[in-house]
Image (tube, grey):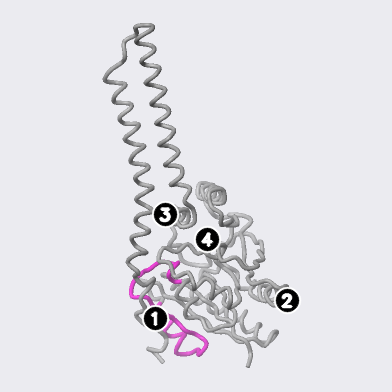
Amino acid sequence: MSELITVVVPCYNEQEVLPLFYDKIREVMGDMINNYGIDYELLFIDDGSKDKTLQILREYAKGDNRVRYISFSRNFGKEAGIYAGLENSKGDYVVVIDADLQHPPQFIPQMYEIVTKEDYDCATTRRVSRKGESKVRSWFARKFYKIMNKISQTEIVDGAQDFRFMKRKMVDAILSMPEYNRFSKGIFSWVGFKTKYIEYENVERAAGTTAWSFWKLFLYSLEGIFAFSTAPLAISSLLGVLFCLISLIMIVVIILKTLIWGEDVAGFPTIMCVMFMLGGLQLFCNGILGQYLSKTYLESKSRPIYLARETEEDVR
């Protein structure tokens, strides 16, 4: 019995690019069958799409026995889509790839060679350029990786992608972490395993528009920081100690200036500046505590990461 590769494809409003991706991935995986004698299945995860993505997946499933899909009851996010794909994969190897063709499918044979012949558990890609992105977005992305690697014990490679080829044992390790607040880039690094990176130039979407706005990416970066570092809590504590020392020094200076030089102490402006400064600092520190508390609160509910509304079995 030949080995099996499961290709996991998270989808959200991908009706324009799906036909292009489907043709390309079938071509690449057909070559895998011919060259390596390894079979495959395509597992699409419809993340509550509002366009015709689900209709297209239904047609693929009816005409192609290698196509499977899971359609969520609503939009749960890409992290839930990746988890659902890994959880329902049947392959000895699992590939996670986006449908927009920014992850070049032609890398899959090279990844297979790396994992099977070079004793790696995972082959993945990293972008060495951000061609096509705005300068502001690229700058913030680079800063995120620098900050993340300084405050976290989990190293995340700059430009690393979710596009990766993994052995089953690594997939099982990832599934052993069923946390609700997920940051896959951090989880992939945290579980360890021997990983090789393939560098490539950034590729723009083949069709359609991205669902990742700057604001969503910013919130996603905060998710990663709070999920894999407690440094913000330490920073808030250090700020508290620092401002206590500053206030103590100010008190001593004011007393000495009044007693020795007889200078008057400025009243209302000084008080208002100190109140605003300390009030802002308290809100900032409380906000950090609130973020960690909210994550703990969501985890304690033990809600499912996703809910499936439909699968390929409903149309076959």
Is the residue marked by circle 4 packed among few (<14), some (14-19), or many (20+) residues within 10 Å? some
Identify the residue at horizontal 40%, vertical 36% (top origin).
240
| Mark pair 2, 3: CA separation | 39 Å
Q: Is residue 54 above or below residue 191?
A: below
| Mark pair 1, 3: CA separation | 31 Å
> Where on the picture, by quarter, is residue 315?
bottom left
Please provide percent x and percent y for residue 307.
Answer: 35, 76
Q: Earlier in the sequence, mark 1 or mark 3?
A: 1
Q: Which mark is on residue 55?
A: 1
Q: Is residue 270 above or below residue 53?
A: above
Please provide percent x and percent y for residue 41.
Answer: 54, 84
Residue denoted by label 4: 186
| Mark pair 1, 2: CA separation | 39 Å
Please provide percent x and percent y for residue 39.
Answer: 61, 87
Please provide percent x and percent y for residue 16.
Answer: 46, 71
Q: Tell me the mark number nearer the camera, choosing from 1 and 3.
A: 3
Identify the residue at horizontal 45%, vertical 64% (top origin).
182
Residue 82 magenta-drawn? no
| Span highlighted in magenta in the image | 54-81
| Mark pair 4, 2: CA separation | 26 Å
Determine whether the residue tagged by mark 2 lies in a helix, strand or loop. helix
Q: Earlier in the sequence, mark 4 or mark 2?
A: 2
Which amino acid, by three-letter code, is at mark 3? Leu
| Mark pair 4, 3: CA separation | 15 Å
Which amino acid, by three-letter code, is at mark 4? Gly
